[in-house]
Image: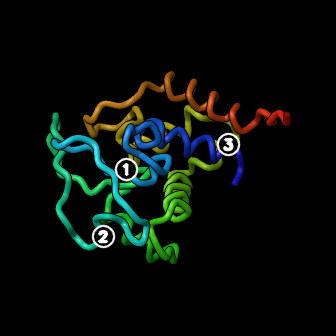
Amino acid sequence: MDNKIKAFLDLVAFSEGTSTSELTKQDGYDVNVSGIHGPSVFDGFAKHPFEDGGEVIVREGPPVLASTAAGRYQLLARYWLDYKAQLHLPDYSPVSQDTVAVQQISEREGLALIEAGDIEGAIKACSNIWASFPGNDYGQGGKSLATLVEKYNELLSNYSTPSVMA
């Protein structure tokens, strides 16, 4: 996977707060949406934690909402089932989560924007996917465009900097 795409995926995880969660042991791949009982994680990647129904997580507002968002990119269970079938995914592993996120970005024509270096355009194109991106009407807060562009450049530099051998 291209470094620009990796950095963008890292940006989504940063923006959604999964990779920075104090509870994650898997770089955000194991994080459920935070609810009224605080943040939580799930164990195992055999399936999406809400795939078989299960109790949704209630998030305080505004707006108050019930959510099945889980994983590094906070994918809702109802979307997971469609992507799982469409992409022939065997589980909810990090590889499967990345595959779905890249597919979602592609569906919004964000991959071409990322490749062209238009990160602002990619963020705007994907704002209806992730509530933490600016430019949507989800009313869940989020990060500013300037903050996200600055963070993306930092993340990209992590991939571009050669490692130093001792």
- Nearest to the eye among marks 2 and 1: give it: 1
In the displayed structure, 100 sits above or below 28; it is below
- Position of 124 compared to 135: left or right? right
Q: Which residue is mark 3?
A: 4
Q: Residue flagged by tag 2: what amino acid is it?
A: Glu
Q: Residue at x 20, y 67 (%)?
A: 54
Marks 3,1: beta carbons within 8 A: no
Residue reaching furthest to the front: 166
Q: Residue flagged by tag 1: what amino acid is it?
A: Val
What label sits on residue 31 in the rendered view?
A: 1
Q: Residue at x 55, y 42 (%)?
A: 10
Seen from the viewer's position, the closer of residues 166 and 115 is 166
Seen from the viewer's position, the closer of residues 136 and 131 is 131
Q: Which residue is mark 2?
A: 51
> Mark 3: which secondary structure?
helix
State how far apart marks 2 and 1 are (Cα): 15 Å
Q: Residue flagged by tag 3: what amino acid is it?
A: Lys
Residue 80's quadrant in the figure?
Answer: bottom left
Whole-percent x and y of residue 165?
Answer: 85, 36
Classed neighbour count for the residue bearing mark 2: other residues with Cα under 10 Å, few (<14), some (14–19), many (≥20): some
Marks 2,1: beta carbons within 8 A: no
